[in-house]
């Protein structure tokens, strides 16, 4: 058992630090330590967890394998420090790829050559995406960096593996590949999807994803108290993943603007909840906006089921719920919304992140911007050959060579 919690208020007036670290030490006994802030408490928990599970210097454990270190040291450490979704991804990379290859190797025997050969094989197999290979490399590097920090390894053989001098990683994603991974729906496809929603609640959920740009986990983490219909704003500060409630991906809260249509759809859903209460379905309206029959929030698989069903009924394919977030971003940019505004709505820490993913959808082809640079031309400033030059290139516009071109 290991946890961080805040003391409840009480009658005890003895001065004490508000945060408590609750853990089981190396002696097998339960201990509690106090801290001034939550951050200090979490750092102390990591330190004590490491101490409790420490195996000792490599010299004293010459037969320590990668698998033993991962199970006894590293996994317990990241489980107290990382989000559930991240831990789940790490476990997948470890159990499916890393441990089958390196689990039986002694930690101090693992070399850079091992890692380079392993990653090269993964790339050449052609069965894994670049994103998956990057995940495997990142997990391996993070684990070995912790081993160095624990004094169980001298160097991290996974640092910058696959990168030639002055070049990017072999499995880095280029802009063309990134553009292909973003599959927004057209306005017509969004309308067809909403018309094909299996029920009213599913329709409102799809509207929220397409008109609010929330991640699916953020949408199912919304409570009615997060909605401000007066200012038409949504407070986004939670994320549900795999049944676990946590913070947003960035760990920050944000306020998302509600369009009039989205506000009307959410209002209609609340009216439906009130009717359901009158009919005896609820004793009280559930706090969660999108909920199961017992009032608990939906799960990711419920969102995917509703989305897939609407997709099939609309005669569409090749999309996932997250594509509605891409749709929201690309439509805003196409309509001329400032990049900084779109970044704030999506919850990106920097507009450059938004630009990295959605630059392809920025408006183009409007010549008024460059035309605005032109001023009135002074007479004969272009020289006597300019008109002749224009006639020579007139065929590029599909005109006859002797066509007259007007310059404004």
Image (cartoon, grey):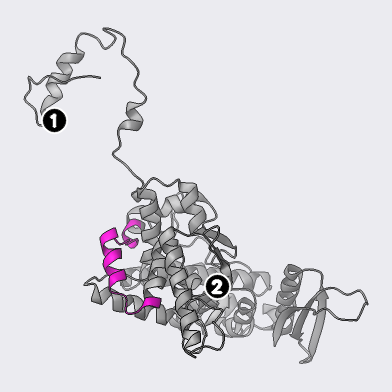
C-alpha gap between disc 2 and disc 1 = 60 Å
Instruction: Name the residue tied to disc 1.
Output: 396
Corner quadrant of residue 189:
bottom left
Chief SS of the magenta region: helix
Residue beneath disc 2: 224
Q: Which residues are magenta?
A: 179-201
| Vertical order, 236 against 44 (above or below) | above
Q: List x then y, in percent, for residue 294.
A: 50, 89
Image quadrant where one finds the C terminus: top left
Q: Residue at x 35, y 81 (%)?
A: 305
Q: Nearer the viewer, residue 383 or 5?
A: 5
Q: Nearer the viewer, residue 278 or 241?
A: 278
On the question of residue 191 being in view, the answer is yes
- Mark 1 falls on what kind of element? helix
For the point 30% across and 64% down, the residue is: 190
Q: Are marks 2 and 1 in contact (CB under 8 Å)?
A: no
Tell me the mark number nearer the camera, choosing from 2 and 1. 2
Q: In this rendering, would 285 be left or right of 309?
A: right
Q: Position of residue 362 (x, y in %)?
A: 36, 46
User: Looking at the image, can residue 56 be seen?
Assistant: no
Outermost right residue:
14
Describe residue 59's horizontal placement relative to residue 274 as left or right.
right
Q: Is residue 381 above or below residue 234?
A: above
**Quarter where residue 318 is shown:** bottom left
Above or below — where is 290 with respect to 167? below
Q: Secondary structure at mark 2?
A: helix
């Amino acid at each position: 058992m290991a946890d961080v919690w805040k003391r409840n208020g009480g009658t005890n007036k003895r001065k004490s630090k508000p945060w408590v670290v609750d853990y089981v030490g190396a002696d097998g006994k339960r201990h509690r330590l106090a801290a001034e802030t939550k951050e200090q408490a979490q750092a102390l928990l990591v330190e004590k967890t490491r101490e409790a599970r420490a195996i000792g210097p490599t010299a004293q454990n010459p037969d320590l394998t990668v698998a033993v270190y991962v199970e006894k040291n590293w996994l317990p450490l990241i489980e107290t420090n990382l989000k559930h979704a991240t831990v789940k991804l790490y476990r997948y990379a470890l159990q499916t790829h890393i441990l089958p290859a390196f689990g039986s190797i002694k930690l101090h025997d693992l070399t850079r050559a091992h890692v380079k050969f392993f990653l090269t094989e993964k790339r050449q197999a052609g069965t894994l995406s670049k994103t998956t290979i990057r995940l495997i490399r990142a997990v391996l590097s993070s684990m070995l960096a912790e081993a160095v920090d624990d004094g169980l390894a001298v160097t991290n053989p996974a640092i910058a593996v696959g990168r030639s001098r002055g070049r990017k990683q072999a499995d880095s994603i280029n802009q063309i590949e990134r553009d292909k991974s973003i599959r927004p729906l057209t306005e017509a496809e969004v309308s067809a999807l909403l018309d094909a929603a299996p029920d009213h609640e599913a329709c409102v959920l799809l509207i929220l994803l397409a008109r609010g740009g929330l991640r699916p986990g953020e949408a199912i983490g919304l409570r009615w108290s997060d909605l401000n219909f007066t200012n038409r704003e949504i407070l986004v500060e939670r994320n549900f993943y795999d049944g676990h409630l946590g913070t947003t991906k960035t760990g920050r809260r944000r306020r998302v603007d509600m369009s009039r249509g989205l506000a009307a759809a959410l209002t209609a859903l609340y009216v439906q909840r009130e009717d359901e209460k009158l009919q005896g379905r609820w004793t009280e309206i559930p706090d969660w906006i999108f909920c199961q029959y017992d009032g608990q929030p939906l799960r990711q698989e419920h969102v995917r089921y509703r989305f897939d069903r609407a997709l099939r009924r609309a005669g569409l394919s090749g999309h996932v719920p997250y594509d509605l977030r891409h749709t929201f971003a690309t439509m805003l940019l196409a309509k001329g919304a400032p990049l900084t505004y779109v970044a704030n709505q999506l919850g990106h820490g920097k507009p450059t992140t938004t630009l990295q993913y959605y630059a392809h959808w920025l408006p183009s082809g409007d010549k008024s911007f460059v035309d605005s640079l032109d001023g009135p031309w002074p007479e004969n400033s272009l020289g006597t050959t300019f008109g002749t030059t224009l006639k020579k290139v007139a065929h590029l516009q599909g005109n006859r060579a002797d066509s007259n071109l007007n310059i404004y």
